[in-house]
Image (spheres, rainbow, N blue to C red):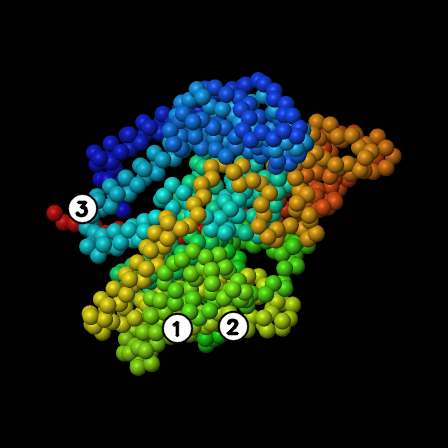
Amino acid sequence: MKTVGFWKLKSTRIILLVATVLSFVCAVRILWPNREYLYEGSTLFQEGIAVSDCTVFEEISLSPGVYRMELEYSCSTDMQSMCWVEDGNVFTNGLLTHGDQLYSGLSQTDFHMWLFERTDTLQLLVKYDGEGYLQTGNLRIYETNGLWGICLTIIVAATLLLLVIQMLRWYDRQYGLSREKKNVIFLLTVLTLAASVPYLMGMTPSGADLTYHLHRIEGIKDGILSGQFPVRLEPEWVHGHGYANGIFYCGTLLLFPALLRIIGFPVTFSYNCYVIALNALTVWIAYYSFSRIFGNKYIGVTGSALYTLSVFRIYKLVITSAVGEGSAVTFMPLVVYGFWRVFTEDVHDKAYRSCWVPLALGYAGLLQTHVLSCEITAFMTLLLCVVFIRKIFRKETFWELCKGAGAALLLSLWFLVPFLDYYIREDLHIKHVWARPIQERGLYLAQLLFNWWRLGDNAVIGELGMRHSHALGVGFILILGFLVFGVLWFFGGFKDLDKRIYKIGKLSFCFSALLMCMSLEAFPWDKIQGSGRLAASLVSSLQFPNRFLGWASTFLVVLCCSCLYFFREKKQKRFYYVGLLCVLTGIATSGLYLNDHVIKSHNPLTLFNEEGMGKGYISGAEYLVQGTQEETLLYHAPVTDGGLLIEEYEKGALCADFRCINAGGQEGYVELPLLHYYGYRAYAGEEKVPLPVCKGDNNVVRVIIPAGFDAQVSVRFVSPWYWRVAEAVSYMTLLSFLVIYVRRRKGGWRKPIAK
């Protein structure tokens, strides 16, 4: 497309000029040396006398900015005392921070605060519970580039938004946008905003899994800042011991909120931005998939609305904050569209050679968001292959399936290789969780019909029935679409229509029925689990049978769209509009009504810095080495076997440096506050002589020190070479995708409208 005319527009130039000037100001301020402040003082707390808010420093003068606070201290207890800053004279939300807890193994705090108004009355306070020894020392305040990074990001985002709007207007004048396309863009934008309302209210709806996923974002941020990319071990988790969550729970999409955190945005704001972006991605992927399948843009919009505001998706993403599963749902329509193309299009058509692309992107998206959803997807794929066993062995079809699966694996190889390496090599706690029953967590049949919301916290309905349970199902409207399609199928209504729609409808009907049955409490999960160790492990890993409702909702949306397609093709406008009215009613009583539920009933959460969450939470500890006692993993100094001397000790992110002297005649060891996973290496002296590294007490890193040793020791986590090869393969595959996309877009623009 020749866009020279667009860049010559006066309005475009004004937007770019203003953005350039403002960005230049921010860039200059970022490059400007940051200020540091030192406040000297010392406060000794009297043991046995608890103090709830002792002012240690007051009348601190600061300009607006994002600051890092370092308070020197010495204490003998862990997490019993804390410090924070406050100022009653700044405007509401003009000061954002949570302070920091105090640990006996640390000598200073390291927390951030956001100050949006100049102040001369800032105070630093300390809470002391009266137990043990506590003395505070000097306070150092370091100005960061966070505030100006935030301003620059907002300027760039606003500029891009204005340019997109301007581009659409210019494109419409030059080439012409049809009324249908304009309506689609408007409806999808409104749909994105409707789905994002809970995250536009200055807080975050607090689900059971929210804190865990916020820790994941912080872990990726800390890992990148420590020099890792991609992030394998989150360095600050488990009180600085490092945790292998990134190995087993891929965080590709979480790179976006982690980048916002690095720039300087607060924690929950970054998370809210992520969910809004995820909603937009879901809206457009669902629209793209359903509109392509049914050949109608309005049916695509309807399917996108039903899918994005489906009961299951809202339950997972908003009510329970199951970010991994809620993110995986985004890619399911793409997989359906890919298989629909592979099994229904003409194999001799030139366009058939691109059928593998949506399959590859869909499967890669699932692999890199939620592994358990991939387990269910693998089950669905196996069933699909059985149904289409004859078509699979056509040369053209088999080749497209191989390309789709191969490309998905190559795109995800950077994640899969470390995942399999650790799963095989390490004796992790997750391998020993195989006897957890799930049948009692299944749903009652009535729950599938729920299309409204109420507050609840009971997930194991086998104990209390449906009392105090979450409103979880697929919703009455999707069930209605299921029933209507069943009636039309039974009476042969689809036989004289497009056979491809008929086929995907029949398949979706059978699959959705099966998946809904598998989500029920009546399904014999306990018997399946008792049939063998492998079955027990697979069933236990599912945790909740309601996970099958993700794919069930996808197929049910296909059925609803099939019914609308039927009424449209049969020119039965009355039923077509009644169907649209039912869809609107379903959205209003589930998705939109949920917003009111969130505002009135759901517990909000607002977090600013990492310290507001703590650094010890690791959910079920699935990725610890079996036998590790996590409650003892606190900040502490190195531990030796008694005959070694440690000097100049410095602990960093997944690393440690110290001088070690072993004057004895026998080898000794040093145990560091780092959880041992494969990849840790130790080197001695400038010659980098390797030292043996193994698991010590409580599975921490133990470095073996030979007799007569006197040298500097450096301990680092180093990714194995074959991990790096896998990363390079994934990067090259992604680059190939981009090249293919650019080539196919070339020359695809229309000529200007004749004037």
What type is the residue that disc 2 sits on?
Phe
Asked whether residue 739 appears in the rendered view, the answer is: no
Q: Residue at x 42, y 64 (%)?
A: 473
272 vs 527, left or right, is left
The location of residue 195, given as percent across then percent down, is 35, 52
Q: Which mark is residue 173?
A: 3
Number of residues whose C-alpha sits closer than 10 Å to that of mark 1, classed few (under 14), some (14–19) or many (20 or more): many
Give how far apart the Cα atoms at labels 3 and 2 are. 58 Å
Q: Residue at x 14, y 49 (%)?
A: 754
36 vs 166, left or right, is right
Residue mark closest to the camera, 3 vs 1: 1
Number of residues whose C-alpha sits closer than 10 Å to that of mark 2, classed few (under 14), some (14–19) or many (20 or more): some
Q: Nearer the viewer, residue 584 or 263?
A: 584
What type is the residue that disc 3 sits on?
Arg
Give how far apart the Cα atoms at labels 2 and 1 are. 19 Å
Q: Nearer the viewer, residue 368 or 258?
A: 258
Give how far apart the Cα atoms at labels 3 and 1 are. 44 Å
747 vs 59, left or right, is left
Q: Which mark is residue 509?
A: 1
> Quick one: SS at disc 1?
helix
Residue hosting label 2: 523
> Quick one: SS at disc 2?
loop
In the rendered image, the vertical position of residue 596 relative to residue 148, given as above or below: below
